[in-house]
Amino acid sequence: MALIVQKYGGTSVGSPERIKAVAERVKRWKEKGNDVVVVVSAMSGETNRLTALMDEVNANGSNRERDVVLATGEQVTIGLLSMALAAVDCPAISYTGGQVKILTDNAYSKARIQEIDDKPIKKDLQAGKVVIVAGFQGVDEQGNITTLGRGGSDTTAVALAVALKADECQIYTDVDGVYTTDPRVVPEASHIPSLALEEMLEMASQGSKVLQIRAVEFAYKYDMPIRVLSSFDDDDNAKSTLVTREEDIMEKVMVRGIAFNRDEAQLTISGVPDKPGVAIKILEPISDANIEVDMIVQNIGSDKTTDFTFTVHRNDYQQAKQILEGVSESLNARECSGDDRIAKVSIVGVGMRSHAGVASKMFKALADEGINIRMISTSEIKVSVVIDEKYLELATRTLHEVFDMASGTSAT
Ligand code: ADP
Ligand code: ASP
Ligand code: MG
């Protein structure tokens, strides 16, 4: 007998029919003798609807109240799924994040899970019930409702799997696994049967939204394998992707996947003094405003001055630009500029560790298409470039072709 945590995303619970289909699947797993804990997202579109509603009432509402509203989406689906299970004679009980309880810090809208009380869940499982937990939400120490950031139900599922020492964490979604890149952008993308948690971590952090980054961080930290599958295929042995430890991956390819992100913006301050302490003078006020910086590039100085460029989330662009204009004055900089129509494309693969030349192959492919690279950053298993947003699809398709990914494995 195994303990399985299953997570169903928005489209998987997007209608009464889909919820009934989930109930049938959960019942099948239960009847095979497993203990089953289910995490659900809000019905597809619901979180966006709630966000729009709040923006209409008060776009500057407090983050605490925003989380109170956002968390309602998942409360609906846990109740509905529990009722759907009752209708097929499968005993179940639903819990909100606060009821479980999933304790988080108090960073509204991007709270981090700190602790999960596994005792009530274990008790219900022992009593033969399926336990349904609302994804994406928790409570802080004062009992305030918090949410975990968009896509956060993945993190609820992995964190529960870790807390309960589950045998498997299954993420059911609208694709039958992780592909070499987003199949909505490159229809020829190939299915990946298994990949390393490190690779998924880079892909998620570079923009592949199939799994929330924090979910992969949890899985990586606690060595919890994740299986990504489609809830639209009724065959329980259908194709899926196992995201697991690197040692367990048979085939190590050079480029496993291509991730992209259009949520960033670039800021440049030029002609700043080339002397110690300047980087901190530029970045401190940005971090004081709680704005996260992603890539940073500083040129080698000439004429005792240098240029400093960095990227932030597009939502933070205006605020960051304003801060930078203030800094620019105090540093006597020549110019302060920015662009919020940029995108980042990354190639990822553990095989890069042992292969030279992958970056130059990437740069040549982009050059051949006339795509200008604005910034570059690398890690052991990743190369990222910032380009004009208008070239994003072209760059992704080109790299997918150049690294021969449509055929299943990458070129060496
Ligand atoms: P859910 O609502 O189930 O959480 P998401 O929309 O968050 O589903 O994630 C699934 C989507 O992720 C897919 O429909 C797909 O468009 C997108 N996606 C992005 N990158 C990839 C990738 N490399 N492989 C598979 N899907 C991807
Ligand atoms: N409902 C939330 C969202 O749309 C959380 C999730 O689906 O994982 O982002
Ligand atoms: Mg998701």
Image (cartoon, grey):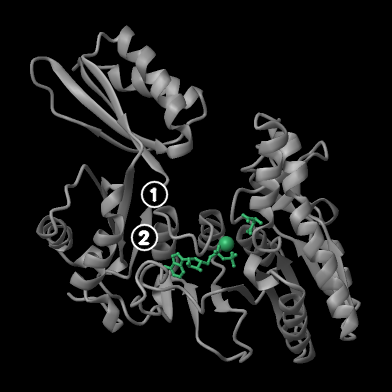
Query: Is the residue 101 above or below the residue 229 in the image?
Result: above
Task: Say which residue appears at 70% left-offset and 70% top-offset.
Answer: 13
Task: Say which residue appears at 44% left-offset and 19% top-offset.
Answer: 285
Residue matched to label 2: 259
Name of the residue lying farthest toward the front: 56
Q: Position of residue 388 (x, y in %)?
A: 26, 46
Q: Which mark is residue 262?
A: 1
Q: Nearer the viewer, residue 345 or 372?
A: 372
Q: Nearer the viewer, residue 149 or 242?
A: 149
The reply to whether residue 117 is visible in this rendering is: yes
* CA neighbours of label 2 inside 10 A, class few (<14), some (14 to 19), many (20+): many
Query: Is the residue 289 above or below the residue 19 in the image?
Result: above
Residue type indicated by callout 1: Arg
Task: Say which residue appears at 20% left-offset and 67% top-offset.
Answer: 354
Task: Tell me: 275 left or right of 122.
Answer: left
Q: Is mark 2 within 8 Å of ligand 1?
A: yes
Q: Nearer the viewer, residue 296 or 320?
A: 320
Task: Say which residue appears at 24% left-offset and 18% top-offset.
Answer: 335
Q: Position of residue 407 (x, y in %)?
A: 27, 83
